[in-house]
Image (cartoon, rainbow, N blue to C red):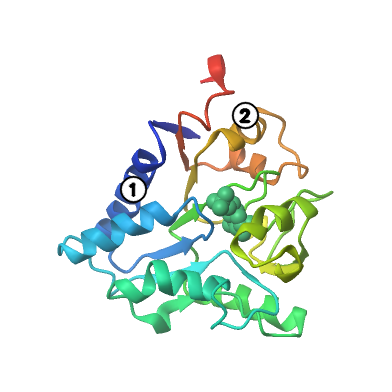
Amino acid sequence: MRIIKAKDYQDMSRKAANIISAQIILKPDCVLGLATGSSPIGAYQHLVEWYGKGDLDFSGVTTVNLDEYRGLPRDNAQSYYYFMHEHLFGKVNINTSRTFLPDGMEADQEAACKKYDETIRSVGGVDLQLLGLGHNGHIGFNEPGEVFEKGTHCVDLSERTIQANTRFFASEEEVPRQAYTMGIQTIMMARKILLVVSGADKAEIVRDAFFGEVTPQVPASILQLHQDVTVVADAAALSKCGELL
Ligand code: GLP
């Protein structure tokens, strides 16, 4: 695991965007695994800006997103489909028929998960997977549990995650209670992983996930066992790692 220290959110975002753009330049037909949440927004802004300057071409890129709320239609402003179009897909020359997310409106859980696993397989797997980090150590929506979940599955969101995501909704009641997410095994099969994390409120979980025991109770801890992980973290997020770095 490579940990790159960034000064602050802006610096983290620029460094992460540089890594993503290097991937696109080196392999223009790459498959990017993408994430939502506030952590990657700054990186997406840089990518959009560099596309605007003519430095990046998304025409050959395929994307698969980590997760989607169950029961939110695509035109709901809080759906991850909407988020991706707002922050990236609608602003660059990506072929939107090559952008994939789990179908949050598919009521049949098994069908939704199977279909998404098949999609990931059919695009040839992920070259570079971008991840954020939940306060409880979740990646995608893989919540702390007894086992590392394998493929795409439907998750009951933890109370902590519902609370953390309430800020995006009018009230806590409106936050969906379930989501479809790629599993840990799928995430671990990505050829490269890039995790971005920022802020003092993540300092404890950064220490536990990357320097603590590998356990399903801290889903991101499994990343310690991946052969090509880059973590770009700002000073506040690394503030509890001290001499471990
Ligand atoms: C959500 C997403 C995760 C994301 C996490 C952290 O739960 N499903 O993919 O990493 O939130 O979000 P933020 O970056 O806003 O802290």
Left or right: 49, with 179 as reference point: left
Left or right: 68, with 62 as reference point: right
Q: Does label 1 point to a residue whose CB lies under 8 Å from ligand 1?
A: no
Give the answer, above or below, for where 146 lies relative to 236: below
* Nearer the observer, 155 or 167: 167
Residue bearing the label numbered 2: 207
Q: Residue at x 29, y 72 (%)?
A: 92
Query: Does residue 220 appear in this view?
Result: yes
Q: Residue at x 76, y 68 (%)?
A: 173
Q: Residue at x 50, y 30 (%)?
A: 236
Q: Residue at x 43, y 59 (%)?
A: 127
Q: Position of residue 183 (x, y in %)?
A: 67, 60
Q: Which disc is residue 157 wearing?
A: none
Instruction: Find numbered disc 1 in the image and state the secondary structure of the residue it sits on.
Output: helix
Q: Position of residue 235 (x, y in %)?
A: 46, 28
Instruction: Find numbered disc 2 in the image and state the secondary structure of the residue it sits on.
Output: helix
Query: Does residue 152 appear in this view?
Result: no
Give the answer, above or below, for where 209 lies relative to 69: above
Residue bearing the label numbered 1: 19
Mark 1 to mark 2 CA distance (whole Å): 23 Å
Query: Which mark sits nearer the N-terminus, 1 or 2?
Result: 1
Give the answer, above or below, for where 181 lies relative to 112: above
